[in-house]
Image: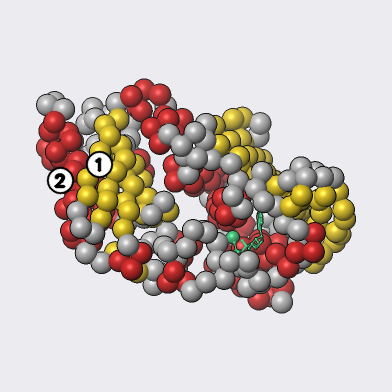
């Protein structure tokens, strides 16, 4: 079983950022309103995610580390219909097969469990007192898979990738208060007050958020809303375009280009806007026949959606009379 977990880990756990993503998604699924992420040495020394979610009952803690024993099993094509982010039951066992994992959790205030697993082997389980919620600590990542370690980039790069993932998760959930620290340095804090503009401001800096224009439009199939920057924004990269499909962060080259196109000639060549675009659609229009962890999806009527995005942004910028 450990070998199967390690093979699954090859797909799920590519780098420290993938661990952060899986742990935070579990915290989101657990209904948390506060999620604190701490990493040390860009995640290689420690990745710690603490939440105030529903916790795991003592008799289910072991089960959480068994593959495909998810509490949320559904058909993978339901990905955009279901509310939970996890559904494969692979993340925890995969991570625990290539690292040391200490999970402390309580489903009821005060009545907690702590379990320690290293390289897929359980080292201890004990009763502890802790508030409701869960804390997962991941140490010695890839200690038993040196080939993985070798593929990692510099600590700065790995930290940047983690930071990027945390940003997207925070953007997708303005109702959750996120904090993110690396080696005791606070890198992000969001209020969790449901205000997307304030969340954007926490991530990209106050000045940029004040320059954001609200957009909103719809046609028969799609609703788009969110914020786009005025063209004068200069320090943005292509990474500053975030697409949220039914509340889930996705990567889509065509749609990102539709955003850029919306600026027409207002955007200088080589410049990028800051844009957070929320797209709502019937999940039957989403095709998830790609790896679910990779955030890539296909959308039917994509052409129409692209046009809607481009026209909406174009009209909004035009309205500003720049
Ligand atoms: P999945 O998310 O696909 O169900 P995971 O391996 O990520 O699989 O997690 C396994 C199970 O452990 C989850 O289904 C959930 O029941 C439980 N779990 C993991 N993390 C948490 C958490 N932070 N809070 C509550 N339950 C959790
Ligand atoms: Mg999960």
Which residue lies at the image location 51% right of the left edge and 44% below the top edge? 166
Q: Is residue 93 left or right of residue 11?
A: right
Which badge, 2 or 1, comes first in the chain's sequence? 1
Q: Which residue is drawn at 22% across and 45% down?
A: 217
SS of the residue under disc 1: strand
Q: Are marks 2 and 1 in contact (CB under 8 Å)?
A: no
Question: Hey, which quadrant is residue 121 in on the image?
Answer: bottom right
Nearer to me, 245 or 15 = 245
The quadrant where ligand 2 appears is: bottom right
How many numbered discs sit on the rendered protein? 2
On the question of residue 37 being in view, the answer is: no
Q: How far apart are marks 2 and 1 (CA)?
A: 11 Å
Q: Name the residue under label 1.
A: 216
Mark 2 falls on what kind of element?
Answer: helix
Query: In this view of the protein, which residue sits in the foreground, 68 or 122?
Result: 68
**Residue 237 drawn at (x, y percent):** 33, 39
Quadrant housing the C terminus: top left
Residue 24 placed where, x, y %? 58, 50
Image vertical order of residue 104 relative to residue 317, above or below: below
The circle drawn on residue 313 is none
Residue at image location 55% in from the left, 66% down from the top: 87
**In the displayed structure, does residue 119 sit left or right of residue 160?**
right
Residue drawn 22% across and 31% down?
231
User: Residue 132's spot in the image, x, y percent?
Assistant: 73, 46
Placement of the N terminus among the 4 image quadrants: bottom right
Q: Is residue 107 visible?
A: yes
Q: Residue at label 2? A: 311
Q: Residues within 10 Å of mark 1 (few under 14, many from 20)?
A: some
Mark 2 closeness class: few <14, some 14–19, many ≥20 residues within 10 Å: some
């Amino acid at each position: 079983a450990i070998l199967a977990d390690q093979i699954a880990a090859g797909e799920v756990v590519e780098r420290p950022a993938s661990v952060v993503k899986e742990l935070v998604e579990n915290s989101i699924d657990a209904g948390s309103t506060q999620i604190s992420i701490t990493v040390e040495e860009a995640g290689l020394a420690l990745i710690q995610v603490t939440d105030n979610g529903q916790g795991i009952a003592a008799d289910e803690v072991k089960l959480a580390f068994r593959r495909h024993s998810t509490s949320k099993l559904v058909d993978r094509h339901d990905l955009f219909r279901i509310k939970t982010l996890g559904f494969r039951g692979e993340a925890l066992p995969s991570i625990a097969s290539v690292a040391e994992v200490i999970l402390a959790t309580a489903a009821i205030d005060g009545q907690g469990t702590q379990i320690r697993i290293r390289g897929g082997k359980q080292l201890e389980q004990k009763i502890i007192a802790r508030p409701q919620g869960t804390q997962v600590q991941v140490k010695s990542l890839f200690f038993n898979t040196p080939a993985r370690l070798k593929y990692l980039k510099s600590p700065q790069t790995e930290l940047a990738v983690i930071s990027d993932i945390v940003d997207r998760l925070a953007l997708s959930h303005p109702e959750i208060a996120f904090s993110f620290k690396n080696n005791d340095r606070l890198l992000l804090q969001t209020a969790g007050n449901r205000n997307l503009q304030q969340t954007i401001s926490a991530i990209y800096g106050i000045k940029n958020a004040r320059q954001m224009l609200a957009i909103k439009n719809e046609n028969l199939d799609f609703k788009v809303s969110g914020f786009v920057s005025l063209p004068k924004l200069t320090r943005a990269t292509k990474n500053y375009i975030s697409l949220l499909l039914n509340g889930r962060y996705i990567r889509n080259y065509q749609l990102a280009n539709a955003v850029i196109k919306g600026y027409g000639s207002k955007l200088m060549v080589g410049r990028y806007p800051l844009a957070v675009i929320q797209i709502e659609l019937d999940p039957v229009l989403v095709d998830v026949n790609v790896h679910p962890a990779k955030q890539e999806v296909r959308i039917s009527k994509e052409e129409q959606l692209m046009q809607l995005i481009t026209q909406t942004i174009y009209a909004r910028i035009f309205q500003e009379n720049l």
